[in-house]
């Protein structure tokens, strides 16, 4: 497959003067996303994960209510930008009508979207989720429980629907002090050979 054109690391003229590097959690599990499959970056902000997966030869979709942070990507081959208010209460057509090889969500939480996110994963698709959890208020914002995951909450979202590959919950010091919860889970619960009904385990990238 041909290498896509390079995507700038800076979004000139956007409110995000310098684009943060990809989340190490997302970067670690990116190799598990089916090759060439479409990737959705939900609440994409400055597009750091759009850029990551585009360089990995995935068609990418960035969804946000404010696309100024990815304005420099408009018109780039293999990049689709969709403006939508995820919290209006109205169905999001993109999640209703499309299926993705991976859905990436970082530093964002709107619990009513969980069912639609799971439904929008294609068979074998990966959910990569990382955001703040209860206890984060001691370090700053977000501090409201509405925006903080409860202990084990992402595991409950995946239970019965996805195979959990990796999960973390706890305090971190970088890129800033925070309490975070992270999930990597795959839409595959088909029983593996000789595993007593359990799905075939995925390799854990280093």
Image: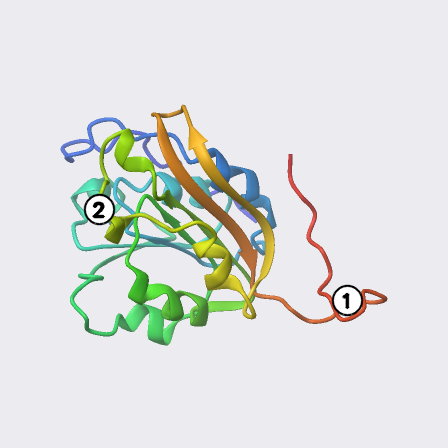
Q: Mark 1 points at which residue?
A: 192
Along the viewing direction, whichever of 52 and 180 lies nearer the viewer = 180
Residue 75 visible to an observer of this rendering:
no
Residue 180 placement: quadrant: top left
Q: Residue pushed farthest right?
A: 194
Give residue 26's position: percent from left, percent from top: 48, 42
**Compared to 11, does 186 lie above or below?**
below
Neighbour tally class for label 2: few under 14, some 14-19, many 20 plus, Cα within 10 Å: few
Camera-side mark, 2 or 1: 2
Which element type, helix, strand or loop, lies under badge 1? loop
Q: Residue at x 31, y 36 (%)?
A: 136
Along the viewing direction, whichever of 200 and 112 lies nearer the viewer = 112
Q: Which residue is drawn at 70% across and 47% down?
A: 203
- Mark 2 → mark 1, Cα distance in angstroms: 41 Å
Looking at the image, residue 25 sits to the left or right of residue 192; the answer is left
Give residue 20's position: percent from left, percent from top: 33, 30
Labels 2 and 1: the sequence-earlier one: 2
Looking at the image, residue 86 sits to the left or right of residue 80; the answer is left
Model colouring: rainbow
Q: Name the residue under label 2.
A: 144
Which element type, helix, strand or loop, lies under badge 2? loop
Looking at the image, residue 101 sits to the left or right of residue 20; the answer is right
Looking at the image, residue 131 sits to the left or right of residue 144; the answer is right
């Amino acid at each position: 497959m041909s290498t896509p054109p390079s995507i700038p690391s800076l979004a000139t003229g956007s409110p995000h003067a310098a684009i943060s590097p990809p989340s190490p959690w997302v970067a670690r599990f990116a190799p598990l996303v089916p090759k060439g499959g479409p990737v959705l970056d939900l609440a994409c902000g400055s597009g750091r994960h759009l850029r990551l997966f585009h360089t990995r030869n995935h068609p990418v979709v960035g969804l946000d209510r404010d696309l100024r942070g990815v304005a420099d990507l408009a018109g780039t081959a293999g990049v689709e930008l969709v403006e939508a208010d995820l919290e209006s209460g109205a169905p999001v057509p993109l999640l209703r009508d499309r299926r993705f090889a991976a859905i990436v969500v970082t530093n964002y939480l709107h619990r009513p979207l969980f069912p639609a996110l799971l439904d929008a994963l294609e068979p074998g698709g990966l959910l990569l989720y990382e955001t703040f959890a209860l206890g984060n208020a001691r370090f700053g914002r977000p501090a409201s429980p509405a925006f903080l995951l409860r202990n084990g909450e992402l595991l409950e979202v995946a239970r019965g629907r996805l195979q959990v590959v990796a999960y973390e919950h706890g305090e971190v010091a970088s890129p800033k002090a925070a309490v975070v919860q992270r999930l990597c889970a795959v839409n595959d619960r088909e029983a593996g050979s000789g595993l007593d009904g359990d799905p075939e385990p995925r390799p854990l990238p280093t």
